[in-house]
Amino acid sequence: MIRTGHRRRRHRRRQIARRSLALLGLGALLLAPSAAGVPGDPTPPEITVATFGTLGENGWYRSNVSVIWTVTEPEGPPLSTSGCDAKTLTADTVGTTFTCSATSDGGTTSKSKPIKLDKTAPAVSGAADRPPDASGWYNRALTVSFSGTDGTAGIEACSSAGYSGPDNATASVSGTCRDKAGNVGTAAVSFKYDATAPTVSRVRTKPGNRVAHIAWKGSTDTQHVEVMRSPGMKGAPETVVYQGSAPSYRDTGLTAGRKYVYTVAVYDEAANRAVQSISFVARGALLDPAPGESVKSPPLLVWKRVKGAGYYNVQLMRGRRVLSAWPTRARFQLRRSWVFRGQRYRLRPGVYRWYVWPGLGRLSAGRFGHLLGGSSFVVTAPNG
């Protein structure tokens, strides 16, 4: 009996021990990490990015750009990161992408940031809407259009500019081009501009025997002169009879008694033009007054001097001869009244014709050369 009770107590102690070991094993199992997951870290890391630089237009940056990543893990630090160190972009680029990845027991997170950078202003040039008008000069309003090139962002828009003065041998206009990032380039175009015409004055004529002496005064900026005559040569309505830079011209081969119009045109270096015209009646040997010229006072009769003539015979007609005179010079001043063959005459309104012969030798010899010519004038007002 004693031995049997002892065995029962020992068996009970063994059962209690086994139960205690089982409870200890269950507790350890509950406290140990699970091989299938981490109940204490259920989320991956969080990544944020900050960029520092001058933001331009259309998503472009216009200065160096710094990219800074921030990685956070609420349940503890991540196990590893890649590409998450701070970087600074300094070179122009149409697109560079930075990527940051972080891995923790909760998983992997990855984030990318694309950067477009253009720090360079466009290259700009300008061109006028037409070539210079003359000798490198513009003489009327022009427009300069600007264009540009940009190897990164590309050109967004360019300006234009007009110019219409003041006159300036070193005139210029400026313009711009803007690229798509907002960078602005500038350029200037220089040119010579003169829209002011020169001046021509004191245009005058002096008659000769079927010759016209034309003279003029051009302003200091005159570079070229043209003289046009109407009627022109060989039946043309107008002919340019002179081109050059002199202040006068002698036109020959005219028809006595014919009316001509001379137009003097002066040009400056920019081809600006000024003109002035004058009428002229061609003479033969009898120079003044012009054939058919109207006068209101006694005219001075002038003719071409004849070599070897010691005197001249001038005769005046009004229906009949009313005067005959023997001047020694190639001119004779008419009076308001005079006596011819015992009769007094007055210069009354009407048409008068006059003729001249050269006298050869002594006056008493009465030897005359060939008739120099005849002409006429018209008295339009009485001279009493």
Image (cartoon, grey):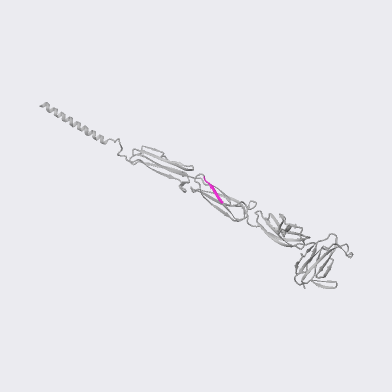
Quadrant in which the C terminus is drawn: bottom right
- Relative placement, left or right, of 203 versus 164 is right
Percent x, y of residue 285 = 80, 62
Q: Residue furthest top?
A: 3
Percent x, y of residue 357 = 84, 64
Percent x, y of residue 280 = 74, 62
Is 118 situated above or below 369?
Answer: above
Q: Residue furthest front?
A: 235
Is 338 situated above or below 50?
Answer: below
Q: Nearer the viewer, residue 22 or 85?
A: 22
How many numbered badges does the structure rendering display? Answer: 0
> Quick check: can you spot residue 169?
no
Percent x, y of residue 283 = 77, 62
Q: Which residues are magenta?
A: 145-150
Q: Say which residue appears at 67% left-offset and 58% top-offset.
A: 274
Quadrant in which the N terminus is drawn: top left
Q: Quadrant of residue 302?
A: bottom right
Q: Residue furthest left?
A: 1
Q: Say which residue appears at 55% left-offset and 52% top-offset.
A: 160
Question: Is 15 inside the magenta-drawn segment?
Answer: no
Q: Quadrant of residue 210?
A: bottom right
Q: Main secondary structure of the magenta part?
A: strand
Q: Say which residue appears at 10% left-offset and 26% top-offset.
A: 2
> Quick check: can you spot residue 97?
yes
- Relative placement, left or right, of 78 versus 202 is left
Is 305 situated above or below 336?
Answer: above
- Relative placement, left or right, of 276 versus 143 is right
